[in-house]
Amino acid sequence: MNTKRGFLYALFGVVLVVVVFTRLYFPNDETGGSFGPQGPLPAFGQEGWINGPGPTPAELEGHVVVIDLWAFWCGPCKKAVPDLIKLQKSFESQGVVFLGATNEGGENLDKSQAFVKETSIPWPNAYGTEKLFDELSIEGIPTILVVARDGQIVWRGHNARRAEEAIVKALALKN
């Protein structure tokens, strides 16, 4: 009898840990975000770039920037890419810049490069951005940031489809 009870407690504990982990690292599609000033975008502090060189701060100045924070092992990150590509195609004529960043470092560069290739991400992606993830207190991925022309983060969420409204609002801001 005690063995069954111990097993049930252990099973309950494992299920609880899995649920908590899943909520933290794989937010659901309804996790939105509210539009408004959230502070300046910190420097990426990357080890390097995938898909060519990344932009300089001067090249980003005056542009609305959308940043996808991801990891190669993240299923929801992979699922978000087609919606992000559609957004990029919709807003590229308005000068919106898309970037990606993964906190995975050089030791996993081959896996990160394979993720970018497999998902056909066309924009530059920084790797080894642990400092950026820490400074932004990223607790779940994918996390999408919308940065206004003045360099202030104005939206953060987990759903690429909900980012469209934030991009439109950021484009309408007068800086």
Image (spheres, rainbow, N blue to C red):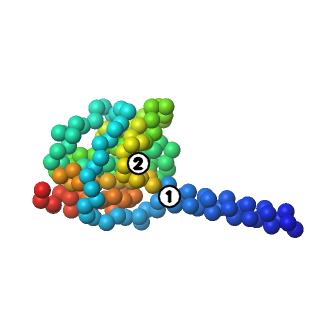
Q: Position of residue 126 (x, y in %)?
A: 35, 38
**Is 8 on the left-hand or right-hand side of 33?**
right
Q: Name the residue: 15% across, 61% down.
A: 172
Q: Amino acid at mark 1?
A: Leu
In this picture, is 134 found above or below 114? Answer: below
Residue 24 is tagged as 1
Disc 2 is placed on an element classified as helix
Is residue 174 visible in the rendered structure shown here? Answer: yes
Disc 1 is placed on an element classified as helix
How many numbered discs, if any?
2
Label 2, label 1: how many angstroms apart (C-alpha)?
15 Å
Number of the front mark, 2 or 1: 2
In this picture, is 109 found above or below 171? Answer: above
Q: Earlier in the sequence, mark 2 or mark 1?
A: 1
Q: Name the residue: 21% across, 62% down.
A: 169
Q: Residues within 10 Å of mark 2 (few under 14, many from 20)?
A: few
Q: Position of residue 29 (x, y in %)?
A: 43, 62
Quarter of the rendering occupied by the N terminus: bottom right
Q: Position of residue 18 (x, y in %)?
A: 61, 58
Q: Name the residue: 37% across, 64% down.
A: 32
Nearer the observer, 81 or 31: 31
- Quadrant of the rendered structure where residue 146 is? bottom left
**Is 14 on the left-hand or right-hand side of 76?**
right
Q: Which residue is mark 2?
A: 134
Q: Name the residue: 62% across, 59% down.
A: 17
Quarter of the rendering occupied by the C terminus: bottom left
Q: Amino acid at mark 2?
A: Asp
